Amino acid sequence: MAKSILLAILKASMILIFTGWIALWLLKPTDLWTRKWKGAEESARTTVFGYYGLDFAVYTFPLIAVAIIGLVYLDLKGGEPSSRQAKISPGAFSNPLVVSSFIGVLSAIEILAVFLFIVFLAWTFYCHISNDFKKLMPIKELKLEIWQLKYLRVATRFGLLAEACLALLLLPILRGLAVFRLFGIQFEASVRYHIWIGTAMLTFATLHGASTLLIWGVSHHIQDEIWKWQKTGRIYLAGEIGLVTGLVIWITALPQIRRKNFEIFYYTHHLYVVFLLFFLFHAGDRHFYMVFPGIFLFGLDKILRILQSKPETCILSARIFPSKAMELILPKDTSLKYNPTSVIFIKVPSVSKLQWHSFSITSSSSVDDNTMSVMVKCDGSWTSSLYDLVQAELDSKAETTKCIPIAIEGPYGPDSMNFLRYDSVVLVAGGIGITPFLSILQEIASAQSSSRYRLPTRMQLIFVVKKSHDIFLLNSISSVLQNQSTERWHLKVKVYVTQEKVQDGLTLREVLTDSSQVQTVHFSTECSNYATYGLESSLCIAALAGFASIVFLVLLICFNHIFVPSQKKTSNLSKDKTPSWVADLLLISSFIMALICSAVVAIILRWRRLKSESPLVPQKKGKAMDIETSSALEEHEIHFRGRPDFQDLFAEFPNEMAGSEIGVMVCGPEAMKESVALICKQNSQGVQKKKPHFRFHSLNFAL
């Protein structure tokens, strides 16, 4: 009872703080707020707190507080029994409302959020422009005509719209400090929000910069203004550098470049440091406090991720499949637990010392105590290099294999198992998109003897592959497929091979029992004595975030009182001699030192944890997976030379499945997701009460 009350208090606190933060953004463009806030800043300027501390406390800290309280909330909620979480029925808002090949699959709640954000941008733009036109004053240096002066104000306000987008830009890509986890949205799913916001931000920033240059050009002042690094106010050159940097980041992130030249995308994306730095110099510290919450959380999150991936561990073994795919077996500590569909980020220094790539975990922590596994399919230079590295060891005639060091970050995954909400579940996978479903099936199979879970009674897996050798990706769940028919649940698999002729008599049993097609290689573990320990606890991360906030504020106040002349002690003339970028440098210095202090504390906590944990447990060599022949495998189907007709398949589900709501989880190509989403959308529009509803969930196997 006390725990439920505490959760309710934390939830109410987050709602109130977040609502207040949104209210600040709504009030900021109004004259009322401008007058009141200028008075508050002037009053705070003469105090120890200073206007800089006031701006941080009002504009920046509320969102940081939401993240801190949210971590505590998720930690407490994670201790609830899974059966309680399973009874929460998903809302119809999560079902597809718009399905388009151009924008993808959008739910009602996503469309509502986008609509509200557009309304907010329109409100901000209208308030600023209407006030600007009422108080329009000529600029002595430029001597502009009325229409030029008005258009220059419009250009300036486009910059404020870009600022509003920047305030949200980094929030969707947080991992350990992920604010979106409070809404049940994981990192790999929220990346597209980052793409949307980034595109909108660069659009407004380009309009802002191009329009300003246009006015300078038509008024013949472009040569005078474009190279200015002003002592106070907007630094034009910094804005130009920031805009060019942002455009380079955006262009190299386009799908046409990202998919073919991932390295170019990866390395140029790190120019965000340059972009943010010059945005600060261009906009000034007051505007920077508005966007600082996301930057602060992202910086702390990045530091914790770097420390969490240390020290490096190593690959225990690899199983190579005929489809140029392999399953890597990695060590983990017995205390590390994760939910199905979790992902980890992997760096292999012998392939690239800088690149990290995400992979879905295919194993279940309920089944494997000391190891976890991921599936890697050759689909680029990095994965091909890793495959060649493993294959070379397999082909080597040496008596001993070498050790392959590997850095692991994560796992990151859902706080609850959403698929437990349904009586029946349909899993639709395309190619390597099978990976998150392997962990789900193993988790459900291991929980059959437990009364703790409310499990689906019937499941169906639809697996679409190009060639029959891709079916070997199911090898890790062969034991699950053999024992799928029990009193508590029933699993049926339908495999569709799209690019091969019909092979008479070929069954799933024959494919999975052909052990000659799967090769295993074991690696030495001499280069590392550490397993994967996972993230720090949510409470620990929340404490570090609070500590970093306090250190930052204290340093900021001290630096400003030391290096910036006080209005009490100096005249206005001497005060004007202090360049505005000095305050910007003090803000950066405070931020960096706060991160360093937090990193030192995190390192101490990390090594204390490593000392208390058990060392790496090498995998025994010669251990092979024995696949016994079972009649249970005969029930599953293999279809050749054709893609599945989802319309017909979904029409049969009500007769084959149980329950009023059927969970549909899809992972694979976008075209497949859109086809399944469209059917779920059509079904959810029905009015028949007895007709079961399909609840659509999209998963990602790659970012």
Image (spheres, grey):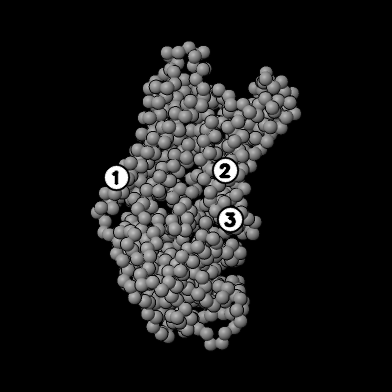
Q: Nearer the viewer, residue 337 or 530?
A: 530
Marks 1 and 3, how far apart at CA: 39 Å
Residue 604 badge: 1
Q: Please provide percent x and percent y for residue 184.
A: 45, 54
306 above or below 133? below
Q: Amino acid at mark 1?
A: Ile
At 51% from the left and 52% from the top, the residue drawn is 190
Crowding at mark 2 (Cα within 10 Å: few <14, some 14-19, many 20+): some
Residue 485 visible to an observer of this rendering: no
Q: Are marks 3 and 2 in contact (CB under 8 Å)?
A: no
Q: Residue furthest left?
A: 612
At 34% from the left and 75% from the top, the residue drawn is 622
Marks 3 and 2, how far apart at CA: 33 Å
For mark 3, give the secondary structure.
loop
User: In the rendered view, does 75 fall on the left or right side of 226?
Assistant: left
At 37% from the left and 80% from the top, the residue drawn is 626
In this figure, which residue is indicated by the disc labeled 2? 117
Q: Are marks 2 and 1 in contact (CB under 8 Å)?
A: no
For mark 2, give the secondary structure.
helix
Q: Nearer the viewer, residue 416 or 221?
A: 221
For mark 1, give the secondary structure.
helix
Q: Amino acid at mark 3?
A: Asn
Residue 261 badge: 3
Q: Please provide percent x and percent y for residue 270.
A: 52, 45
Marks 2 and 1, how far apart at CA: 42 Å
Q: Residue furthest front?
A: 398
Q: Please provide percent x and percent y for residue 127.
A: 61, 31
518 above or below 613? below
Of labels 1 and 3, earlier in sequence is: 3
Q: Amino acid at mark 2?
A: Phe
